[in-house]
Image (cartoon, grey):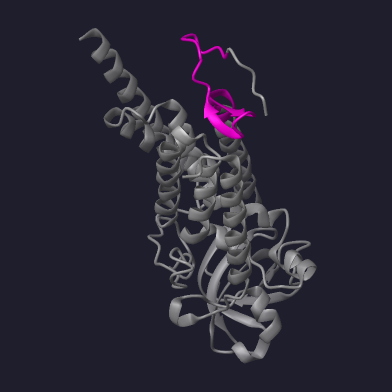
Amino acid sequence: MPDVLTHALAAYAIATLLSIRFEWLGSQYVTIAMIGALVPDTTKIKLLVDSAQVEATLGVPFSWGALHTLGGSIVIVLAGAVLAGREHRGPVLLALLLGMGSHHALDLLIAHPAGHGYALFWPLSGYHVPVAGLFHSSDRWPAAVAAIAAAGAYHLRYRIEDLDRSA
Amino acid sequence: MLTTPRSRIAALALLIAVLTGMLVAHGTVGPDPDRHRYPDLEVLSQEGDTLVGDRVVLSGTAVETNPVVLSGSPGARPDVIVVLTGVERDVDRGDDLWIAGTVQSDYSVSVTTAIVRSPWELRYMYVVSAIGGLWVLRRFVREWRFDRDRLAFVPRTDRRGDGADVREVTD
């Protein structure tokens, strides 16, 4: 998976571009989309508490890997929407789903030595989906490309707003 | 739907229960080469020679370079080392290795694809990831607040045009 900054920048770019078309998708919901883009990476909690440690402590099978699947991600997204005020719940849900989707889409582009990434559709399917192998998670250029895309989206979004105002 | 604090707490409890169930269920998922789920270092350490001829995907650190020897990350389990043959990339001691290959006898693996990363590349990844996380957190704190009365996150709708917040974060 690319680094967190690349995911956040990509979600910012996509949500900001969509905000040109969808008025409800204001700056605060762009932020929610960016949070959605970080949801699958909650699986990185394993760097702090290893799955095997939890397994040994609880005495039951356990894997943080569930968080980096559509199933686990969607449950977290739903919890996020429940935490929002009632009138904001719909937009929050859509923004979280947008960001979460952008995360998984980007992760399908990275390189994996076996050519297949992870069980994207788990728990529906345990099949490890093929990945494009365009870059490695520690490559520097994806963040640069995402930053340029984010700057371009910002420019387009607010330039159009200025043009609208002056029209 | 979900209009009262009680119903929302019940919904959250249900979602947490579902997520916990998923974390446990995912712990039971084992290798299945037909679905491109290959044994990892932990499975290799447990099943050893029964995997001879099978494909594995291993990650760890290079502790030797001639031949290349992969070890699980320091402090992490399982505490095993694997000799890698056929690595066609330059490897320095301390490099992060992520390989696919076929298990030979005597705990060696014939590598078909290797992704080799220097320690500084991983450090870069963690640093920019922290920057990304802080950026998102800063935006969230500036644009959203926790309404204690409603027990819900709501936008700071009373922001002034100059971007200054008129309310403090309450949680």
Residue B111 in percent (x, y) is at 54, 75
- Please provide percent x and percent y for residue A37: 48, 44
The stretch in magenta equals B139-165
Query: Relative to A8, is B6 on the left or the right?
Result: right
**Quarter of the image where one finds residue B169:** top right
- The number of discs equals 0
Would you say residue B145 sits in the magenta stretch?
A: yes
Task: Tell me: residue B164, above or below residue A51.
Answer: above
Q: Give the camera-side residue of B81 and B27.
A: B27
Residue A157 in sight: yes
For the C terminus of chain A, the image quarter is top left
The picture quadrant where one finds residue B86 is bottom right
Work out whether residue A43 or residue B41 is closer to the camera in this orientation and state it: A43
Residue A25 picture location, percent across and down: 37, 31
Taking B41 as reference, is A164 above or below it? above
Residue B74 belongs to the span the image colors magenta: no
Is A11 left, or right, of A44 in this rendering? Answer: left
Of residues B24 and B97, the one nearer the viewer is: B24
The quadrant holding residue B132 is top right
Q: Is residue B106 visible?
A: no
Residue drawn at the location 40% of the way across and 44% of the way down = A98
Residue appearing at x 63%, y 71% in the figure: B27
Q: Which of B75/B82 is in front?
A: B75
Residue A52, image x, y percentages: 72, 68
Horizontal arrangement in the rendering, residue B85 relative to residue A163 (left or right) = right
Q: Does A90 sit above or below residue A160?
A: below
Q: Is residue B115 above or below residue B55?
A: above
